[in-house]
Amino acid sequence: MSEPRIALCPGSFDPITVGHEEIVRRALHLCDRVVVAVGHRATQAKRGLFPVEERMELIREVFADEPRVEAAEFQGLLVDFARERGARLVVRGLRTVADYEYEYQMALMNRELMPELETVFLGAGPRWSFVSASLVREIASLGGDVSGFVSPPVLARIEERFGGRGA
Ligand code: ADP
């Protein structure tokens, strides 16, 4: 049997949103397994809204129905993690032109560092193209309703953290 084709969906996923989820599910059409890779620096593992461990737990809960999706963390270069996992594909979501400029530069740099690693971009579905984890964090911290932008397990954790909607 040939080796399974593994794609990486890297990001900070603090927390995973419905926009991320859509990209991961679409990435499954392109490969056998998707590794949702939470990138961080060791010194920043606890920074942000959720610690890295919790971000991974949430990814696992959100994809509990999908055995082909795995949550992992990595520090350092994405290309090193790709080599370690035998991945040849990176899938990134594109929302805006601003995303594109940054993403394209990063994809070119990664190609220099690891020519056999291909990056593909999936255009965000129009439904979720305005959703970002940073806005979700901001709205949640100000007591707003984020139920339209995250899945139920993530919403439950946010409500635990902020004491419920509107609190
Ligand atoms: P964010 O920008 O929301 O903090 P990350 O840094 O974790 O997210 O991004 C991980 C990947 O997910 C990136 O490729 C990013 O462009 C993509 N992404 C984030 N939000 C969305 C969305 N709403 N639709 C499509 N792709 C998205």
Image (tube, rainbow, N blue to C red):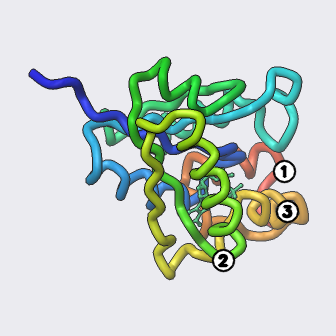
Helix, strand or loop under label 3: helix
Taking the spot 76% from the left edge, 44% from the top edge, the residue there is: 160
Badge 2 is on which residue? 97
For label 3, count other residues whose C-alpha is less than 10 Å away and answer few (under 14), some (14-19) or many (20+).
some
Q: Earlier in the sequence, mark 1 or mark 2?
A: 2
The residue tagged 3 is 138
x, y percent for residue 148: 60, 70
In whole angstroms, how far apart are the C-alphas of marks 1 and 2? 33 Å
Q: Residue type at mark 2?
A: Val
Location of the N terminus by quadrant is top left
> SS for tag 1?
helix
User: Which of the 4 quarters of the picture holds residue 149?
Assistant: bottom right
* Image marks 3 and 1: residues in contact by CB distance under 8 Å: no
Pick the residue in front: 25 or 119: 119
Question: Against 1, is 142 above or below?
Answer: below
- Residue nearer the viewer, 10 or 121: 121
For label 1, the crowd category at 10 Å Cα-Cα, with few meaning under 14, some 14 to 19 and many 20 or more, is some
Q: Spatial distance from mark 2 to mark 3, Cα to Cα?
A: 22 Å
Q: Mark 1 highlights which residue?
A: 162
Between the C-alphas of marks 3 and 1, the distance is 11 Å
Camera-nearest label, 3 or 1: 3
Respond yes or no on whether mark 2 lies under 8 Å from ligand 1. Answer: no
Answer whether residue 19 is visible to the viewer in this image.
Answer: yes
Q: Whereabouts is ligand 1, in terms of quadrant?
A: bottom right
